Image: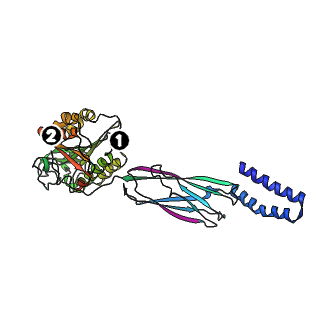
Amino acid sequence: MFSTLLLLILLMLTYAYAMFQGGFVSWFLFYCFLPFAVYAALIFIYPLREFKVTRVISPQRISAGDQLIVKLELKRKMPFPLLFLIIEDITPKEFNTQKSKQIIFLGFRRKYKLTYHIEQVQRGEYTFEAIRLKTADALGLVEKESYLDCQDTILVYPEMVEMVYKPLESQFEQGGTVSAMQFQKNTSLVAGVRQYQPGDRFAWIDWKATARTNDMMSKEFEIRQSNDLLIVLDRTQSNNFELLVKFVASTVRSNLKQGGQVGLFSAGEKMMFIPINGGEQQLHKLLHYLASVDVIRDIHFTKLLLEEVTLYQQSANLLVVTSSLKRELIENIGSSIRRKGAIYLIKKDGEILSREEEELRILAFNSGINIATIYESDFRTAFSEVRLA
């Protein structure tokens, strides 16, 4: 408002000066200033919201550490001459990039495309809210700014490594011998029938029971040995939390790619339990959760595990993934892990175990509890060459 008032005052002053002073110089000043004043007035009434902006983010599936490419395309109907236009993509604050703000010289053009990159994207779920446009006249007397709604949400999956995955059973039941067990049910022995569940094979349908109950029924087969995996993620505040997420995500993908079934329990203020299942849909569900999971301060991890009775009713192998060993964990959860599971202690390369952790490893070994210390560089062979304590 002030800029508009200033423009009118300057225009009136130059005109009054020309009228009262007369002569070539005064009228020359007035006519020189007049085009700038007219253009400033046109800028004032020009609607920046006339622009239509589209944002294309690629790649569609991105992992932590990758490069994000953002393409913006501006379109408008009226070819009004703009001396310059500042375009700023309002990115999530976590990106902390200056590349999303650029100045272009649009002129009479109706379309314009620009691209910028965001390096080393971190894991998480991010929302791009809007795009800011700003322009002004040649003298800077009138400025025009507008925010265009253009919301896009991207999900950055955790960084993952290709693992040589082998079932836990082959390690702590056969002395570390690698076994190429298959994640399959024994379909030769029918134990009963149950209601059909998504993912059941067509051949498992019991047509007689289906006709009798008028509900789709599947055969329930005897499982001689369970190679299903239930992962328990420790969300306690830790400098190694991103490593934990990377390890869990890599384990999930490797397990499911080999036809296995996996579930996840995440201990925190809001506990998350994803039941054991297999297939591409399960992989998407688990990675979607791991993309946005975060640490929880002031939680008692061992206490939460003791209270969650559901964990110990599963027939699956229990894999507790943590970044620090606690005596309460060994003493209270040890019996369950001894029967069907292991504790994986995740550390950065070069990180030395504390004296307490070394003592707890010895205690665990004497108690028959399976503990493996995994360093970041050993993730690929974590399930094929690891030695359990």
The answer to which of 61 and 371 lies nearer the viewer is 371
- Secondary element at tag 2: helix
Asked whether residue 158 appears in the rendered view, the answer is yes
Location of residue 223 in the rendering, given as x and y in whole percent from the top left corner: 14, 47
The span picked out in magenta is 111-130
Location of residue 293 in the rendering, given as x and y in whole percent from the top left corner: 35, 45
Q: Which residue is tagged 1?
A: 295
Residue 115 part of the magenta segment: yes
Q: Residue at x 15, y 40 (%)?
A: 362
Q: Residue at x 26, y 50 (%)?
A: 350
The answer to which of 349 and 19 lies nearer the viewer is 349
Q: Residue at x 20, y 37 (%)?
A: 312
Dot 1 or dot 2, earlier in sequence: 1
Q: Which residue is tagged 2?
A: 362
Q: Is residue 115 left or right of residue 82?
A: left
Location of residue 79 in the rendering, given as x and y in whole percent from the top left corner: 65, 65
- Secondary element at tag 1: loop
Calculate the distance from the C-alpha at mark 1 to the C-alpha at mark 2: 28 Å
The answer to which of 234 and 356 lies nearer the viewer is 356
Cβ atoms at labels 1 and 2 below 8 Å apart: no
